[in-house]
């Protein structure tokens, strides 16, 4: 079966026919061509596929696209505006919060959800918000520094 999916994707309204069993991750990557959202574990455990749905961090690999009907979905591609990186993206770049970069989009989206609900998080808040996002390169120190910088807590 297929359904019509109407949603706001990175601030733009879309209407697409999608199979009822299509995952949000596959819709974004294959249906729309937004490949910043990464396929990691396919089980909602690594965070590489994290996107925002109505401002909340969601693993897109275990979310059906049709569950996003009428909702606002944001991906890493929607973070930059007018070809300028967001404060969080800039902080990740400047504080060396990336190495291989595979986990970075999911980390940034999880951190964005945190900063929207808590603009001045403690380090514990940051660690908790990013606890569903795995990185195998950085050891998290630079990632946490980047989130603190974006929150105005570090120079």
Image (cartoon, rainbow, N blue to C red):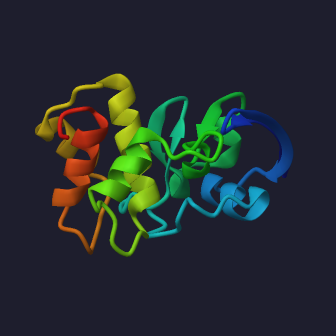
Residue 53 locus on image (x, y percent): 55, 36
Q: Can residue 43 be seen in this view?
A: yes
Of residues 11 and 19, which is closer to you in this image? Answer: 11
| Residue 134 as seen in the image, left or right of residue 121 | right
Q: Please tell me whether residue 68 is drawn above or below residue 59 in the rendered image.
A: above
Of residues 124 and 92, which is closer to you in this image? Answer: 92
Of residues 99 and 123, which is closer to you in this image? Answer: 99
Residue 123 locus on image (x, y percent): 13, 40
Q: In which quarter of the image is the C terminus?
A: top left
| Residue 50 as seen in the image, left or right of residue 16 | left
Of residues 85 and 127, which is closer to you in this image? Answer: 85
Residue lying at 25% horizontally and 32% vertically, measured from the top left: 152
Q: Please tell me whether residue 71 is drawn above or below residue 35 in the rendered image.
A: above
Residue lying at 28% horizontally and 62% vertically, measured from the top left: 96
Residue 84 locus on image (x, y percent): 56, 45
Residue lying at 61% horizontally and 58% vertically, measured from the top left: 25
| Residue 13 as seen in the image, left or right of residue 91 | right
Q: In which quarter of the image is residue 118?
A: top left
Q: Please tell me whether residue 130 is drawn above or below residue 47 in the rendered image.
A: above
Label count reads 0
Residue 153 locus on image (x, y percent): 18, 34
Q: Quadrant of residue 8?
A: top right
Q: Can residue 44 be seen in this view?
A: no
Give the residue furthest to the front. 155
């Amino acid at each position: 079966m297929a359904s019509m999916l109407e949603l706001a994707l990175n601030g733009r309204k879309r209407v697409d026919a999608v199979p009822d069993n299509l995952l949000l991750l596959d819709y974004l990557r294959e249906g729309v061509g937004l490949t910043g959202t990464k396929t990691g574990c396919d089980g909602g455990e690594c965070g590489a596929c994290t996107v925002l749905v109505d401002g909340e961090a969601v693993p897109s690999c275990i979310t059906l696209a049709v569950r996003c009907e009428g909702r606002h979905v944001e991906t890493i591609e929607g973070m930059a505006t007018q070809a300028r990186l967001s404060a969080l993206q800039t902080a990740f770049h400047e504080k060396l919060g990336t190495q291989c970069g595979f986990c970075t989009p999911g980390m940034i989206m999880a951190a964005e959800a945190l900063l929207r609900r808590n603009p001045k998080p403690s380090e514990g808040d940051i660690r908790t918000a990013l606890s569903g996002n795995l990185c195998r390169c950085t050891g998290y120190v630079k990632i946490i520094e980047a989130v603190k910088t974006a929150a105005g807590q570090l120079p």
